[in-house]
Amino acid sequence: MPTNPLGDLDRLRHLDAQAVRDSVALVRQVTPDDLLRPTPCSEWTLTGLLAHMTAQHRGFAAAARGHGRDLAHWRVRPLAVDAAAAAAEYGQAAEQVIAAFATVTAPDRPFVLPELPPVQRFPAAQAIGFHLLDYVVHSWDVAVSLGLTYEPGPELLAAALPVAHAVPDGDYRLAPDSPFRPALPADDEASTLERILLALGRSPGRSSGLSPDRSGPSGDTAPGSHRGLAVRDTPC
């Protein structure tokens, strides 16, 4: 049976919006004392990670509207020093990218993503898939930094996993400015989220002392969820 490319694009946009709004819900829990916490990204505190995430939303929104080549849209700007204001700024950028993706009418519409040389031009469906993966992983980064549980839905994880496996591996991941470290092996018991993280060189399930637990008094972690477990071994 032939597939409907526009239907697939609608599903991808829906899942991307879910990943983005999951990240917004986590960012809204950031307190002033959290902003200087370390993250799984070795080069960033939580403030730096949130500034990067905000800039990426703005850049992808510009790409969806045909302006991705302008590097000004991708520039990382300092966030407000107040946690509530920073979360509000992040939420605004998140809604901007969701709205911009909604304007895309064809899955092959070109997106210019200047931070991904040498290709830079990608069909819309692939570019939105990159964004979806980014915000599954960055939601995990934020949750780990805060010591919170992150439990994305199975449909979202199923969409993100093949994108993670499609990211090229190799020596370029050893470069200082690479966003990923070389892929790590996944055992048979690894959850889908763990497989995504391992494919990108993240290290779930190894205690790093990044942050104390803020998820509640029980100490229970649901199967397939992750809380406060990571190693600061990737620049993100």
Image (cartoon, rainbow, N blue to C red):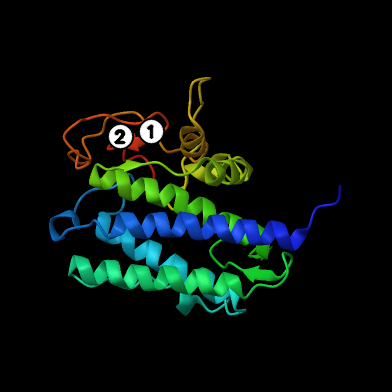
Q: Nearer the viewer, residue 154 or 171?
A: 154
Which residue sits at x=65%, y=72%?
Answer: 104
Residue located at (59% from left, 61% from top): 13
Q: Earlier in the sequence, mark 2 or mark 1?
A: 1
Left or right of residue 215: residue 169: right
Total labels: the figure holds 2
Residue at 62% across, 79% down: 66
Q: Where residue 65 sits in the image (x, y, percent)?
A: 59, 78
The picture places residue 94, in percent across and down from the top left corner, at: 42, 68
Would residue 220 be visible to someone looking at this image? yes
Disc 1 packing (10 Å; few <14; some 14–19; many ≥20): many
Task: Spot the residue most to the left.
Answer: 33
Q: Residue furthest top?
A: 188
Query: In screen coordinates, is 210 left or right of 170?
Result: left
* Residue 117 seen by the camera: no
Give SS at disc 1.
Answer: loop
Vertical placement of 119 versus 160: above or below?
below
Q: Secondary structure at mark 2?
A: loop
x%, y% of residue 150?
36, 43
Using the image, tell me which numbered label, if any, was put on residue 204.
Answer: 1
Within 10 angstroms of label 2, few (less than 14), some, or many (20 or more) residues?
many
Image x and y of residue 190, in percent: 48, 26
Which residue is painted at 63% across and 65% down in the image? 120
Residue contact between numbered discs 2 and 1, judged by CB atoms under 8 Å: yes
Identified by mark 1, the residue type is Pro
Mark 2, residue position? 229
Between 187 and 179, which is closer to the camera in this rendering? Answer: 187
As drawn, 62 above or below 6: below
In the image, which disc is placed on residue 164?
none
